[in-house]
Amino acid sequence: MLLQLHVKNLALIREAEIDFSGGLNILTGETGAGKSLLLGGMTMALGGKVSRQRLREGADYALAELIFTTDRPELLKKLEKLDIPAEDGQVILSRRLSGNRSVCRLNGETVSASTLREVSSLLIDIHGQHEHQSLLNKKKHLEILDLYAGERLSPCLKTLKESWDECRALRKSLDQTGLDEAERLREQSLLTYEIQEIEEAHLADGEDEMLEQTYRRMVNSRRIMESLGIVRQLCEEDEGSASELTGRACKELNTALQYDEELASLAEQLGEVDALLADFGRELSQYMESMEFSEQDFHETEERLNLINHLKAKYGRTVAAIFASAKEKQERLDFLQNIEQRRSELEESYTQAKKKLDVNCKTVHEIRTQAAQELSGRMIKELKELNFLDVSFEIAVKETGEPSALGWDDVEFLISTNPGEELMPLARIASGGELSRVMLAIKTVLADQDAIDTVVFDEIDAGISGRTAQRVSEKLAAIGRNRQVICITHLAQIAAMADSHYLIEKNAEGGGTATHIRLLAGDEVTEELARILGGAEITDAVRDNAREMKLLAEQFKGKTFQ
C-alpha cells in the first residue's frame, strides 16, 4: 500500500506531502489546479520519463518520493536479491532531478531508473488519463491477454522466442547459400588471394612492435651514437673522466687504509662504485657495437614494417586482428567450397527448427485460447457491474500461420452492447465512455490476477455521467475493499464514495502561483461535492444535494461491504 507521496519543486508544486489511507482515495480540484502534477510526481518517483522543463522556476532540483508498505513475498525476494533491506516491509522510492542529472534511490541505495520501474511494477499500477485509447490498437489486446495468462504462458513464450531466434538465424545462413555460381567463384578467388597474402607474410605475434622499436633506433641512430659517445668520454676515455678519478680515489683511500682500519667500510663502498663504472662501460660498449648496421639491414627492416602496416590497413589494426581475419576468411572459404553440402545441412536444420517453432506456436495458441475464454467470462461480469446491461464480450484468438517471436496469433476484443447486435471489433463501436469502462473492467480483472496492492486511476470517468457514473463509483468502492485505490476525478458520484477525500487547489503566493493538497473532513467534503455539482454558484439546494449524495454513498458502502 502507498503510505505517502512527497513532491518538491515540480512545476507549480513548491512542496507537497500526502498521507494516503487504505480503501478509495479521491483527489479533486479545479481544472489546472495541479492534479496531473501529482500523477507526474508519482511517475517520476517510479522511474518514468519526466521533462526537465517540469522543474519549478528558480529551483535547483526537483524531488519525488513514494513510501510503500508491503508483505508480498516476490517483492521482498526481489529486494533481497538486490541486497537492499526492507525493514518492516517498508519500501521507499525516490528520484531527484537537477540539471541533466537524475539520481534514483531505493531504500536509500542508489539504483538505476530501470530498477525503480522493475520494483514499482510489483507495487502499483497506474491507469493514465488517455490509456483507454490504446484499446483501439489490436496489439494492446494481445498484451492484455498475455498479462492475464501470466505464469501459465510466460515459460512457453520464452521457449517460443528461443525457437524463433534459432529459425531466424538458420534462415539467414540459408539465404547466404543462395549465391549464383559466378558470384560464388569470384568470392572464392578473392578469399583465396587474401588468405595467401596473409600466410606468405609469415607473421609472428608481437613482431610489429619489435620492428617499430628497431626501426625507431635505426632512424635515430646518429643522434643516439653522438650522445653515447659523449657519455663514454665523460665516464672512461678523457683525462679526468669519472673512471680515472674513481680509480685514483681508490688508490689514495687504500693507502690511508694501511694506517687506519676503520676506513675499510669506505674503501669497500668506493670499490663498488669503481666496479659499477667498469660494468657500465662494458655494457655501453656492447650497446654501441649493436647499433652498427648496414644499409641493407635498414632497408630490410623498413620493407618488413611496410608489409605489416599494409596488412594492418587491410585486415586489422594488430597482428592478432590479422590472424583473426584470416581465420574468418578461411571459414567462409570452406563454407563456399562446400556450399551444396552446407545448404543441405541448413535446410534440414531449418526444417526441424521450423517444426519445433510451429509446435511452440500451437502450445501458446492453446493457452491463449483457454485464457481468452476465462477472461471473456470475467469481463462480461465486470462490464455488467459497470452499467453495460446486456453486453456480450468475446476475445477472438485466430491462427495466422505466420510465426513471430510472440507466436502466430491475432487477438482482438469483440463486443456487443445492445440486445440482438452481433459482436463487432471494440475499435469500431465503442465510444470514449465505453472504452473507459472496458479499461476499468480490464484493470479490475488484472489487478485481481496480479494482486497489485495499489491501483491509480487518472480520470477514469471520461465520457460518462448519470447512472453509469454511479455504477463506476460503486465498482471503484468495491475494488477499494480489497486494495488501495487512488482516483483523480471530476464526477461527484465518484468523489462521494471516497474513504479519504483530498482537495488540490492553486493559490497566489509570494508573487507567484503554488499548488497545495489537503485532506478534507466533515463539511469540507460536502462543500467540495457541492462545488463539483453546482458549477459557478453553490446554493443551499446544491449543498443539500451534496450531503444526500454523500449519505447515500455511505449507506451503499455500509450495506454492500458489511
Image (cartoon, rainbow, N blue to C red):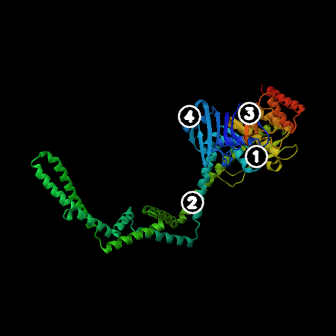
Query: x%, y% of residue 211?
Result: 36, 66
278 displayed left or right of 81: left
Residue 174 rendering spot, x and y as whole percentages: 58, 62
Q: Residues within 10 Å of mark 2 (few under 14, many from 20)?
A: some
Disc 1 residue type (three-letter): His
Residue 85: mark in rendering: 4
Give me the C-alpha separation between circle 4 and circle 1.
36 Å
- Look at the numbered discs 1 and 3 and tell me whether their residues touch, using CB distance below 8 Å: no
- Nearest the viewer among 562 and 532 is 532
Residue at far left of view: 258
Front-most of residues 388 and 293: 293
Residue 516 screen position, x and y as percent: 73, 37
Q: What amino acid is labelled 3 in the image?
A: Arg
Mark nearest the camera among 2 and 4 is: 4
Above or below 444: residue 325: below
Q: Earlier in the sequence, mark 3 or mark 2?
A: 2
What is the secondary structure assignment of the residue under circle 3? strand
Q: Which residue is mark 2?
A: 346
Q: Quadrant of residue 284?
A: bottom left
- SS state under label 2: helix
Residue pointed to by mark 1: 130
Distance Cα–Cα, label 3 vs label 4: 32 Å
Disc assigned to residue 146: none
The x and y percentages for residue 318 are 44, 62
Residue type at mark 2 is Leu
